[in-house]
Structure formats: C-alpha cells, structure tokens
Image (spheres, grey):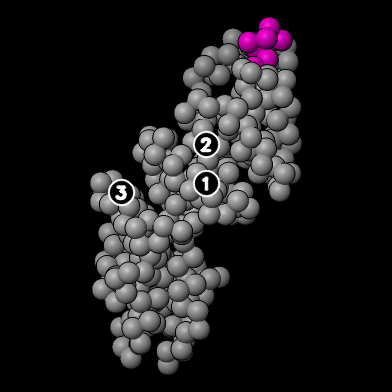
C-alpha cells in the first residue's frame, strides 16, 4: 500500500521514474541516474537536465527524462519549472497520461486550481481506467472541498481495482467529509482487513464511529496511539469523547498526553492551563 502521512489525505503517486524502463546510458551515465527510483530529487533533476542537454536521445527517452525532471522539480519546490518539463514531454507524447497528471500536481502547487482541474479531467479522458488518474482527481476534489465529486472518482477507483486499500481509504475520507459515517466505517474496516496494523485506518475509523459507537471509537483511537506513539491526535480526540461522557479524569489523562506530544489547539491549551499546566 502507498505510504501515508498521518493524518493527511492519501494522494495517488505517479511513478514517473518508471517511464524510463530500460534507458540507454548517456556517455556520463546521466540517463541512468535520471531513471533511478532511489536517487534524490536533486540528483534526478541534475542528471535529467544533463541527459536532455546532451542530445541524441530517442523521443521515448526524452519523454521519460522530461517526465522525471518534472517530478523531481515538484519535489524540489519548483512547480513552474516542472510545468515546463511536463509540457516538453507532452510535445513528444501528446496522449500519454503521466505528464498530464504531473502537470496537474505542479499547477495545484502554484495555486492555479482551474488549470489543475482541467488537467485532471484530461487525464481521465485519456485513460478512464487509470487508477492514478481516478485517485489523483478524487484527491484533488477532496482537497478543493468537493467531497461529492471526490466520491465519484473513488467509487470508480474501487470498481477498477477492488483489492486496492488506498481506494477504500480515500473513499472513506470522502464519506466522512459528506457525513456518511457508516459508509466510511465500512471502507476503513476494509483497509484494516488487509493491513491490520494501519494506524491511519484505525484513526479514521474512530472518527467514523464517534457519536454512533463511542466505545468502538475509543478502542480505535487507543490502537492508533499504540501503533503511532508520536501522534497526538488520537489522544486528543479520545479525550474529547471521554470528556463528553463525564469521564473527566480519564479525559484529562488523554489531554495531557496530547499536549506532551505537541498537539496545537487553543482549547487544549486552556484546558491544560486550568489543570495547572
């Protein structure tokens, strides 16, 4: 399963470096480094540029080098230059999905949301069966505050690959944003069937259970805290449930732990101050 940062949204990753599957070596080895999935973004950018500038690449190699360069430049915080690289790739292969998806990511980084949206729609038109396109477009909609549109894409992703836990996880996030807690709970439970130690899935299922099944939510928050001991959110939200149940001492224990872990919340700061720090 793709890596997640907790508790942020899972975004589908385009494996752009795979575009150079069997690269020929430039005289100085730059093309090989450009295609190296283990290389740093700085090294990829340097060597992709060097390979492109050296000339003599086939159209396919130049396409892959520009896609990889674009992805590296996004990682380096240079989205406007990444757009140029993706445009160069598209000039070589107008119907390939990788540079369209990459450019959508870069445009979003630049705050050009309408242009990014157009690219996500274009990616789905190019390849309606692409998990990267469906997951990426759905994640874009969710970040843009359009969970209903996101849900359409994640539903499509689940239909394309019913074994992909990220599709269920992201669909669960869309259900949560729409207030559909029982549907969200089912999706996060589906993730946990395959990945029973996924802290993020326990945390999100706890959110889905909160209110309807507070004991189940508390159990899930406790498991998330056990699996990700550096994460403050499970402690804080468990404290809020316990506080609402009148279990003040237990709630304060969770609040103190959340505070110790660096949880930032004005309400929590006031609570800890009232408890004597």
Closest to the camera, between mark 2 and mark 1, is 2
- 128 is within the stretch colored magenta: no
Closest to the camera, between mark 1 and mark 3, is 3
SS assignment at label 3: helix
| Magenta-colored span | 241-247
The spot of residue 165 in percent (x, y) is 61, 49
Contact check, label 2 and label 1, Cβ < 8 Å: yes
SS assignment at label 1: loop
Disc marking residue 270: none
The spot of residue 201 in percent (x, y) is 64, 39
The spot of residue 113 in percent (x, y) is 28, 46
Residue at coordinates 65% horizontally, 44% vertically from top-left? 191
Residue 168 visible? The answer is yes
Disc 1: which residue: 10
Q: Which residue, as the protein is rendered here, is positioned at the far front? A: 159
Which image quadrant is residue 242 in?
top right
**Which of the two discs, 2 and 1, labels the residue nearer the N terminus?**
1
* Figure label count: 3
Disc marking residue 173: 2
**Which of the two discs, 1 and 3, labels the residue nearer the N terminus?**
1
């Amino acid at each position: 399963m793709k890596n997640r940062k907790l508790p942020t949204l899972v975004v589908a990753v385009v494996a752009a470096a795979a575009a150079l599957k069997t690269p020929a070596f430039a005289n100085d080895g730059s093309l090989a480094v450009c295609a190296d999935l283990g290389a740093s973004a700085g090294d990829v950018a340097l060597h992709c540029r060097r390979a492109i500038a050296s000339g003599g690449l086939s159209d396919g190699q130049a396409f892959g080098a520009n896609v990889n360069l674009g992805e590296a430049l996004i990682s380096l915080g240079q989205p406007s230059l990444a757009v140029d690289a993706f445009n160069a790739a598209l000039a070589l292969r107008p119907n390939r999905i990788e540079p369209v998806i990459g450019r959508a990511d870069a445009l979003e980084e630049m705050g050009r949301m309408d242009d990014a949206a157009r690219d996500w729609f274009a990616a789905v038109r190019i390849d309606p069966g692409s998990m990267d396109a469906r997951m990426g477009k759905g994640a874009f909609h969710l970040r843009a505050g359009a969970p209903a549109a996101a849900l359409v894409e994640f539903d499509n992703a689940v239909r394309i690959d019913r074994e992909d836990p990220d599709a269920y996880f992201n669909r669960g996030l869309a259900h949560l944003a729409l207030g559909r807690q029982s549907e969200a709970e089912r999706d996060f439970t589906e993730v946990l069937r395959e990945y029973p130690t996924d802290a993020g899935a326990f945390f999100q299922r706890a959110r889905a259970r909160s209110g309807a099944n507070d004991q189940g939510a508390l159990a899930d928050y406790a498991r998330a805290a056990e699996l990700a001991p550096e994460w403050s959110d499970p402690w804080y939200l468990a404290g809020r449930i316990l506080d609402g149940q009148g279990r003040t001492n237990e709630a304060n224990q969770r609040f103190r732990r959340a505070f110790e872990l660096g949880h930032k919340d004005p309400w929590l700061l006031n609570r800890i101050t009232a408890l004597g720090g």
